[in-house]
Image (spheres, grey):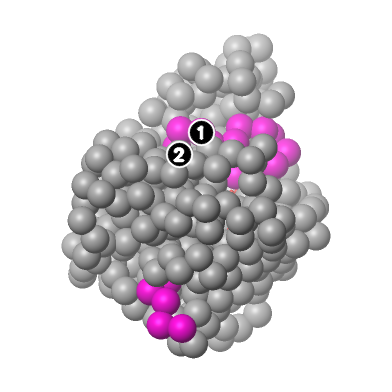
Amino acid sequence: MMSMSTRRIWVAGHRGMVGSAVTRYLEARGDKVLKADRSVVDLRNQIAVEVWLKQNRPDAIIFAAAKVGGIYANDTYPADFIYDNLAIETNIIHSAHAADVDRLVFLGSSCIYPKFAPQPIREDSLLTGPLEPTNEWYAIAKIAGIKLCQAYRKQYGRRYISVMPCNLYGPNDNFDLQTSHVLPALIRKFHEAKESRKPEVVVWGTGTPLREFLHVDDLARGVVFCLDNYDGYEHINCGAGSEITIRELAETVQRAVGFSGELVFDTSKPDGTPRKLMDSGRIRALGWEPEISLDDGIAGSYRWFLENKSVSPA
Ligand code: GFB
């Protein structure tokens, strides 16, 4: 294990929801976080990434940079999701090796697993069946990221690992109604309906899909925990361990926001995968577990939205 006080860690994607949570956590522990703004390094540009990494030579990389979005964004911009993510992954992982960075934690998503994988989904379900069509472009890119880490481990002995989170939420989430994930979208919809005294809020799909939600601060602890304690070839799941239907989630957000109108389900919108609860037994056996309940996390996210909504896109 590296010395805690002297580590210089590059958090790629430090402005995003995951990267900013990891940065907060590392800095609170006394680690030195290296940051590269988009204006300095476009992560899709191979030369820019290679030059920056050779100049800065971090002790480790937390790879939280990605093109991300909810079900509509994934389904509508497949080229952006597959191209941007593949480019960012090949550039960072290859350049990390070229700059002799020996430790890297790549972050994926539970959508890498087959649409109808046995639940709860174990790590060895990867590549055992067809993917969910609304996000297969993103999923294929994330599977490629796992395989890149494994390839550089197999060929060069690099200690590159991959962590798969479930659906995430928290500070710095994207609250744009077209491109966001369900939880921030619902916070915004219920808040705006309450403010303008609308009689109803529209929830996409049937409300029956099940999702597993983890607060991003719990994930940040999990990622750094894996940096310090996990060095396996196989990726490792990091989830909350419980699931909730979209209808139950909508009712929970409704209560947190204090909206008294009706829920209307727009079944012309896709449901996506019916269920994706991960088996996080391996990371729990190593010693990590989530600490933030969904109720507390949603209340905190609503507060964050109220304090920051002027900077969120309409
Ligand atoms: O969070 P979400 O966009 O992503 O949608 P996925 C989850 C579920 O919530 C779907 C429903 O069944 C949506 O139809 N939903 C209801 C809504 N109302 C809304 C709404 O207002 N906005 C949104 N966005 N959804 C994503 C993948 O899948 O999950 C990504 O596309 C990634 O690749 C991410 O894996 C974690 O859970 O369906």
Name the residue nearer the viewer: 131 or 29.
Answer: 29
Residue 301 picture location, percent across and down: 44, 30
Three-letter residue code for mark 1: Asn
> What residue is at 60 percent from the left and 12 percent from the top?
195
Three-letter residue code for mark 2: Ser
Q: Give the residue at the far front of this rendering.
A: 55
Q: Distance between the residues labelled 1 and 2?
A: 8 Å
Residue 145 picture location, percent across and down: 57, 70
Residue 314 picture location, percent across and down: 71, 24
Q: What element carries label 1?
A: loop
Number of numbered discs overlaid on the protein picture: 2
Q: What element carries label 2?
A: helix
Q: Is residue 251 left or right of residue 197?
A: left
Image quadrant holding the N terminus, namely bottom left
Residue 77 picture location, percent across and down: 79, 53
Name the residue nearer the viewer: 42 or 214.
Answer: 42
Few, some or many residues within 10 Å of mark 1 (<14, 14–19, 20+): some
**CB under 8 Å between callouts 1 and 2?**
yes
> What residue is at 44 percent from the left and 50 percent from the top?
10
* Magenta residues, start to end: 156-181
**Disc 1 marks which residue?**
172
